[in-house]
Every structure is written in C-alpha cells, then in structure tokens.
Amino acid sequence: MTTADYADQIKQLDSTLRSVESVLDLAKLRRDKEELEIAASAPDLWDDQAKAQEVTSRLSYVNGEIGRLIGLRSRLDDVQVLLELAEAESDPGSLAEVGTEVVALSKAIEELEVRTLLSGEYDSREAVVAIRAGAGGVDAADFAEMLLRMYLRWAERHGYPTEVYDTSYAEEAGLKSATFVVKAPYAYGTLSVEAGTHRLVRISPFDNQGRRQTSFAGVEVMPVVEQTDHIDIPENEIRVDVYRSSGPGGQSVNTTDSAVRITHIPTGIVVTCQNEKSQLQNKASAMRVLQARLLERKRQEEQAKLDGLKTDAAGSWGDQMRSYVLHPYQMVKDLRTEYETGNPSSVFDGDIDEFVEAGIKWRKQQQQKVAA
C-alpha cells in the first residue's frame, strides 16, 4: 500500500476513535475516577464489603477504560508521525511498520466501538451465567464442562473476576449444570449474545465403537440484581431445601448438609448453590441467582410486550445458535451471524471475542429492523 492509502486509513481510524471517545465520554470517566478514588480511600470502606467490592470493581473498570482510550489515541498519534517519517525518508521498513500497526489499531478500535453498541437497560451489569447439559447423555455433560471452561478462560483472558456458585456433576463425566458470575461492568451486555443452545458434533470419547455423537448444552445469561431493582421475593413464595454437596471437594464439602436448593413457587424456577462452605453463604448466593433469573424473566416479558410477541421466558434461551464440529472437519460456526472459524481448540480455550462482537452487531441490526 502507498503512503496515501495509509494516510486515508489513519484518518478513518481517527474519526472512528473520536466517535468512540464521544460515546464513552472520556471526560465523565475521568470525573467518575476522581469520585471513586475518594470513595476507595475512605477509612470505613471495608465496613460494608459488598459496597467496597462494588467501588473497587468499578474503579478498576474505569481505570481500564481510560487507559484503553488514552493508549489508542497515543498509538494513533505515533503511527501518524511514523508515516510522515517514512514518507520523508522514503523508508520501506518504516512504511511496513506503519502497515502492521494500522492493522492492529483497526482491530483494537473496532473492539472498543462494539462496546458503544451496548446500550440496553441492563447491559452495563455484571452477569450470572448458567450452563446446562442437554440431549446427548454423557457427551452433553462433558460438553457442558467444556463450555464452562471456555467462558472462565475468556474471563481470565480479559482479567475479569469470576465466582462459581454451583457445579452439579454428572455420574460418569462432565457436568449436569453450573452457575457462575462474571464480576465486570458490561459483562451482561457482552455475554448475553451467548445465550442459547450450543451443539457439539464429534467422535465420542465415551463410545467404545468410536461413533460420531451430537450433543447439546444450553447457556443462560442474566444481569446481576442491584439495589435499585425492585425484585421482592416474599418468604412464603419460596421453598428452601438443604442437602449434602456432591462432587469433588475439600474440607466441609460432602460432610455437612450445606448445599441449598431454592424453589420459587409461583414460577417453578429452581436454583442451587453448593460451592460455599456454609449453608448461609450458599443460601445467599442462591438468592442472588434467583433474583437474577427473575430480573431476566421480567426483562424478557417487557421486551415481548414491546415486540408484540408472546415469549416463554423459561425457554427462550433454547434456540440453537452455535455449532462446534470436531468431526469429520474442524469448524465452529454461529448460526445467526454466519461467523465461523476452523480452530475449535482456540475457541474452547476462551478465544470467543470475534463471536461475541459479531453477535452484538447482529443483535443491534435486528433491533434496528424491528424499530424500522
């Protein structure tokens, strides 16, 4: 490419980044940072651990956003200077370096631009994610465990803290279900496009005849409930059962009736938590998951009214949305966006950003179609 071509690309990137800076409101982020730093330095901050974690998590997120915006602006300015030097000195080496950096900047700015599409009421929330094995027997349970690892690795890649609330192990291998929370702003808006039925096709490692097996697992994503939400759950509307934890564990696990199952009688929603050491901790975590489920149910019902459609909130996440094929060829394909890759091992290791970004863009397009 010529210097003129790179100059045009840099100009376009500058325009896109200015738009992103405007939407994310860098000035407001800086004001938020000052306020959060004052709150974080308060001597009595940790008297309320929930509030302290909220403040420190929010401060970490704001610092990250500011650093990302400033870093991209600095890199864009630097590549502009490098292009001018390459042109002045007719240096092909510097021009090649410009090309490499322009490609990297394009990807980084596009990723940040996708964030500006997250404008839903709950998109800025942390996320509760539930994974359930579907049809396919032991292969489905193994697939559910593969998906749990995939999402935890994705969060780890981004530096997002996670906490596993519940893991229900299958008898032979894998998981019947698992529930965990991703403690990062915009985790719900980002991961909500992952909700649906995931399909795996492979030669079953559990079939002694080496036959191909198709199995399914469901992913449900819910926003974490905040104090401003009106999700009241009267005691007479729930049934609480305690039982002994199952599966691998250390001290206090499998030795006492510390696991908790809560049934919400009006809706039939059942949540469990067994990964904490005490019954009280498990009950508190289970209540948070129940509140998240009820909040997501409320959101879906409100959306259904807006769309003029009737939807079953309990089953709306059951639409097949992605296929993972390991035999007779290697491919992971999103059935809504048509995005695909031939590297399933990378995907199962948490490399799902391209799928998530394509899903967010697709959802925005669908919303615009409905609005039109």
Image (cartoon, rainbow, N blue to C red):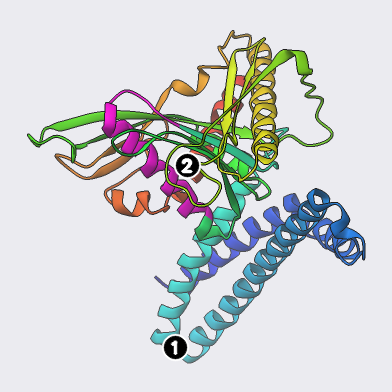
Report the residue that reaches farthest toward the bottom: 89
Q: Is residue 79 left or right of residue 44?
A: left
- On screen, residue 27 versus residue 277, left or right, reads right
Q: In the rendering, at what x and y percent does residue 367 appear?
A: 60, 26
Residue 372 seen anywhere in this rendered image of the structure: no
Q: Amino acid at mark 1?
A: Ser
> In the rendered image, which quarter is residue 111 located in?
bottom right
Q: Which residue is mark 1?
A: 90
Q: Image check: 361 left or right of 123?
A: left
Q: Does 337 appear above or below 266?
A: below
Residue 61: give x, y in percent of width and height.
71, 58
The alpha-carbon separation of the residues under discs 1 and 2 comes to: 39 Å
Q: Give the SS element for disc 1.
A: loop
Reading the image, the residue beneath label 2 is 358
Residue 6 position (above or below residue 56): below
**Foreground: disc 1 or disc 2:** 2
Q: Residue at x 40, y 42 (%)?
A: 147
Q: Which amino acid does the dot numbered 2 rest on? A: Ala
